Image (spheres, rainbow, N blue to C red):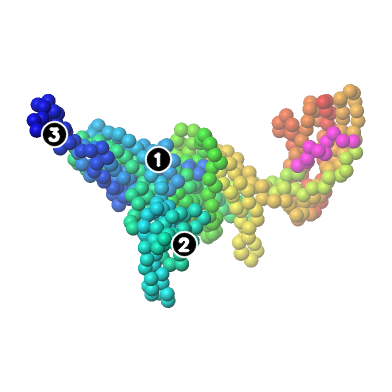
Amino acid sequence: MNWPHSLINLMMILVVVLFFCPLAGAEPTITSTSQEQRNLALTIYNTDLALIKDTRTVNLPQGALEMRFMDVAGKIDPTSVALKTVKADGGVSILEQNYEFDLITPAKLLDKNVGKELELVTYFEGKEVKREKAELLSTNSGNVFKIDGRVHLGHPGTVILPGMPADLNARPTLVWLLKSRDATGRDIEASYLTSGINWKCDYVALVNQKDTEVDVTGWVTINNESGATYTNADIKLIAGDVHRVVTQPPRQAEGKRLYAAMGDQAAAPQFEEKSFFEYHMYTLTRPATIKDKQIKQMTLLAAERASVKKGYTLKATPQFFWHPNPAKMTQKAEVTLELINSQKNHMGIPLPAGKVRVYKYDSDKSLQFIGEDRIDHTPKDEKVRLLLGKAFDIVGERTQTSFQKIAERVFEQTFEIEIRNHKDEEITVTVVEPMAGDWKITSQTSPWVKKDAFTAEFQLTVPKDGTGQLTYTVRTSQ
């Protein structure tokens, strides 16, 4: 047969193209695991979020290739992934990025083999007694097999599959289609955000016998449920109110709560603090390993003999006002501790939000728990106020002794607050009175300050095992 000359030339061109150009999807595949890590850095936020920067040395062939980046967090945000070469020389370009999270499970393995022939093995007393071929018809609400033309619902033995499906992964995997300018080893950094890892701060405070000084230890607790282990990682913690766009309720970290035991001497702090943007960053001074499903604690702060002031507060409820002749109100005084977070007071490090548990030794030198409170993010040189409970031996009684209508929507009220002190020491109680409308204190028997537009505060000194009285009159217009 005589072929046209033009057709022969076209066939020769196709042969050359097929010989020198690989078929689509035939790029070489390389796999990178955590064994190739050169550096791992974690920046953990106190909002169930962490930024992972994973640097690895990878040998890349020349040309197009597929790189499978293993050992990433199971709760990764795929839209946050970025890849770059540490040496930005333009030698590697990214053609495509994928995140494969269809993981191997018994159920998925069976689903991938529906319609295929497999083997069923029956055992008796640990010995194989029967092996037979079967077709897997369905896995919906249970396995359905076809054996010798008959349909069987379930099987008491072991199912042996013909092979491993190619589209299932043992672990979550990032897959890039890259193009490398030359064949060489390169340092590649993959960064991404993940949920499932969080940190918080817990404080332990030990008050001295006179309630005038306190030793404070701050503990960082990191809870890792992200689905990955971070080995010898550089760790930074961000404290602050970082805004995030929430499209669904954030995952709540579960797991056991771990609290450090109170020791006689606090461990040395392991973090260095510095300002970062409008937040504060705490950098661990050594590499650390955080395993998956692990809660880890480290010392953030250790302050000794910080001056503290114990106070008592009696606070009325707004419902007590605006009613003629309300019933008497009897209350317990709240007990508070106040300290200044300053270097002069042996502190001075910005304090991340967290729970403060307060302890004190009794007369038998036994450590006892006396209360706890939660603090917000507290800058240096600001006041920390802890509400510990209510005083057993201090009772307040509030009585309205007068209620007059002076004019239309103008009222004058007189209140008497009696505080009974059953302690064997003199105390000073802060009496907090809520106000409303336009108000003016026209008379009072104790010093007071206008705390804000709706609050008046009085200071009442009460002798030991005695009684103190405060009387004031307020004129209010609505």
Q: Position of residue 438 (x, y in %)?
A: 79, 26
User: Hey, which quadrant is residue 413 in on the image?
Assistant: top right
* Residue 241 sits above or below residue 466 on the image: above
Query: For the residue labelled by badge 1, is the local secondary structure a helix, a strand or a loop?
Result: strand
Tell whether position 323 is magenta: yes
* Disc on the earlier residue, 1 or 2: 2
The residue that mark 3 highlights is: 16
Specify start and end residues of the magenta stretch as a single range. Answer: 315-324
Secondary structure found at label 2:
strand
At mark 3, the secondary structure is helix
Closer-to-camera residue (150/300): 150
Q: Name the residue under label 2.
A: 152
Q: Is label 1 in contact with label 2 (beta carbons under 8 Å)? A: no
Residue holding disc 1: 192
Cα–Cα span, label 1 and label 3:
42 Å
At 53% from the left edge and 36% from the top edge, which residue is drawn? 247
The residue type indicated by label 2 comes to: His
Instruction: Check the picture and name the quadrant holding the N terminus.
Output: top left
The amino acid type of the residue labelled 3 equals Val
Residue 4 visible from this viewpoint: yes
Which amino acid type corresponds to the residue marked 1 in the rendered image?
Answer: Tyr
- Whether residue 63 is in magenta: the answer is no
Look at 11% across and 27% down and name the residue there.
4
Badge 3: how crowded within 10 Å, few (<14), some, or many (20+)?
A: few
